[in-house]
Image (cartoon, helix red, strand yellow):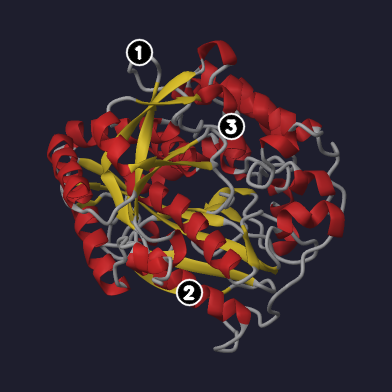
Amino acid sequence: MPTQNALRDFLEIPYDKLEEMNLEVKKARVDRVPSDVLREARLKYLHDEKRIKAVTVCFTDLEGRLQMLDYDKKFLLKSADNLTFDGSSVRGFSAQHESDLRLSIDWSAFYWLPSDVFGPGKVLCFSEVLDRDGNLYGSDMRGRLKRWADDVYAKDQMVCHIAPEIEGFLFEGRDAERHYPDTGKFDYVSTGGYYHSLPGDKLRTFIDGAAEVQRAMGFQNEKDHPEVAPSQFEMNFSYADALITADQVQLYKLLCRQVAANLNMTASFLPKPVTGVNGSGMHTNMSFNKAGKNLYWEKGGKDNLSQPGWDAIDRILTSADDLCLVLNSSVNAYRRLDPHYEAPNQIKSSANDRGSMVRIPAGNERSARIEVRSVGPDVNPYLAFYTVARTALEGPRSDRADEAKRARTRYLPDNINDAIRLFKSSKWVNDVLGESVVGKFAEIKQMQADRCAKSLGALIKVPEIQFHHEVTNQYLWSRF
């Protein structure tokens, strides 16, 4: 009698071939191949490849959770122009009386998947969220970032390049974050420390496995290593257009969580899950490129950074308080902004001081950039990149006449309640995001803050993890 697996013939592609195929798709995105050409090619491929059973369609809610729907391939081929879902069930999206939303597949953001991690016979693509009239839905920050980037390129042939450095922790056991209210602790898998772990220990096994998946998905890896804190990791990939990078941030966290789960462990992107050790950040390296030239490079300039680069820093620092909630969007994030653990909480720039919100790394004509260090790993990457990039180009400038004020060291808010207040009252943030999105985002952040102790205190409290937007789900949230 044949085994059950013998009855199935679903698509499984070797890792080296996966990397080749995904890099071809990535190049088409960079080259801006017209969307109708890509749509026709992808639909033809899905029709012809009989070993694909389902297409995973992704979108991201306002807080940054990656939402995924699996569509049967045959159904998708017939209904790709009419994919609807109930937006009222997604926190931060539509109210019940305006719940009907649509998904518009971005056929340029198409990924072949390692079958041993995601299952055989599936491919994945990202989508925009539209309202019932076919307009871009205001809370879909991926769509907002995509359209802004397209407009900037069409106007000036300008591209925003971003490379993130995403840190995380690896803990023993599956769903360690959701078990935290019962256990009150996280268990390390390694205490090797910065850059150090044995070749076969659990942390290195996880890093190696996750890095292999990244390479297969076309991330163009650069380096990976254990970080300063016990059981902490970082895996870096090459810079890319802001939208491509934001998609990769979402996939990076997804694949890390799944690789960890397969090893009976938990990959956590809480900014500060453990008291007394360094937290996790997502240092965000950014530059602008115009017609093939890096606009932030100037040989011989101060720190070899051009005037447009220094102008971008000035704008970001001027709006630092207003942007803080966007870049540190959870109660737990404000524990990371602790000066005892290399916290980037000072509203200033520096080439060397890692306590500065913005750093100017050593670079050359290709790599000159600025590094926004205060970004947490639990942000909505589309919201963060969109807001920071627009601020760098268009944000208000400081009052250079007030040198005494500029000379004083200022600090970012040290709690989410102050950050919410500054965010809501910011004219610049309201101009960039619109009053509706500002109101929705502030409301759901305040809901989390209200479930937690108003004063952080010295020790991590259970609710700041229990009700964190990447930990809780609708069922757990409603049990408050």
Task: Locate the C terminus and report the quarter of the image it occupies.
Answer: top right
Closer to viewer: mark 3 or mark 1? 1
- Please report whichever mark, 3 or 1, sits nearer to the chain's N-terminal start: 1
Mark 3–mark 1 Cα distance, whole angstroms, equals 32 Å
Confirm or deny contact between disc 2 and disc 3 (CB under 8 A). no
Label 3, residues with CA under 10 Å away: few <14, some 14-19, many ≥20: many
Q: Are marks 1 and 2 in contact (CB under 8 Å)?
A: no
Give the residue number, with chain letter if any, for mark 2.
Answer: 209
Q: Considering only vertical position in the picture, is 131 above or below 116?
A: above
Which is nearer the N-term, disc 1 or disc 2? 1
Instruction: Reply above or below: 3 against 95.
Output: below
Residue at the location (78% across, 55% down)? 179
Judging by the rendered image, the residue that carries numbered circle 3 is 322
Residue 67 placed where, x, y %? 50, 40
**Secondary structure under the numbered disc 1 in the rendered image:** loop
Instruction: Give the number of marks.
Output: 3
Q: Nearer the viewer, mark 2 or mark 3?
A: 2
Identify the mark nearer the N-term, 2 or 3: 2
Quadrant of the image occupied by residue 92: top right
In front here: 187 or 224?
187
Q: Locate residue 53, reporting x and y percent.
A: 33, 50
Can residue 437 be seen from the camera position used here?
yes
Q: Cα distance, mark 1 to mark 2?
A: 44 Å
Mark 2 secondary-structure assignment: helix
Q: Residue at x 22, y 47 (%)?
A: 46
> According to the image, label 1 marks what residue?
133
Three-letter amino acid code of the residue under disc 1: Asp
Q: Nearer the viewer, residue 349 or 333?
A: 333
